[in-house]
Image (cartoon, rainbow, N blue to C red):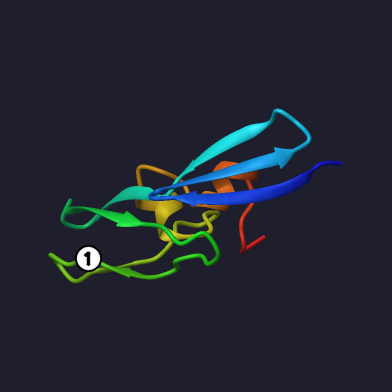
Amino acid sequence: MGHWTTCYTGAIVVVRNNGCDAMSTVVRESTLTCPVCGHMKCETMPTDACVWFYACERCKSVLTPNPGDCCVFCSYGTNRFPPMQQSGSCCAD
């Protein structure tokens, strides 16, 4: 089994399995779209915590994850939460 290291380079998280050629790139930027008013805003996702609440800056609606999703980025974002991008599971599992 290899040793995993994580490198943070701007908005991209690169995860490398040392001793193996496997590498995956994680996108940290996601554009959230409010389902109420359609307002879109690009946000940087955390890598270590699910975001369960997000207030739309236009209509002030508080977004919460859809049933079965771990966070608002998985429900309303253009990119899924970083742990979901890497392995398909997240902090809520």
Q: Which residue is mark 1?
A: 56
Disc 1: CA contacts within 10 A as few (<14), some (14-19) or many (>=20): many
The kind of secondary structure element at disc 1 is loop
Q: Left or right of 88: which side holds 66?
A: left
- Closest to the observer, 9 or 38: 9
Residue at 41% across, 54% down: 73
- Closest to the observer, 80 or 27: 27
- Residue 42 percent coordinates (x, y): 26, 52
Give the residue type at disc 1. Cys
Q: Quadrant of the N terminus?
A: top right
Q: Quadrant of residue 54?
A: bottom left
- Residue 92 percent coordinates (x, y): 62, 63
Residue at 51% across, 59% down: 47
Q: Quadrant of the C terminus?
A: bottom right
Residue at 78% across, 35% down: 19
Residue at 51% across, 65% down: 50
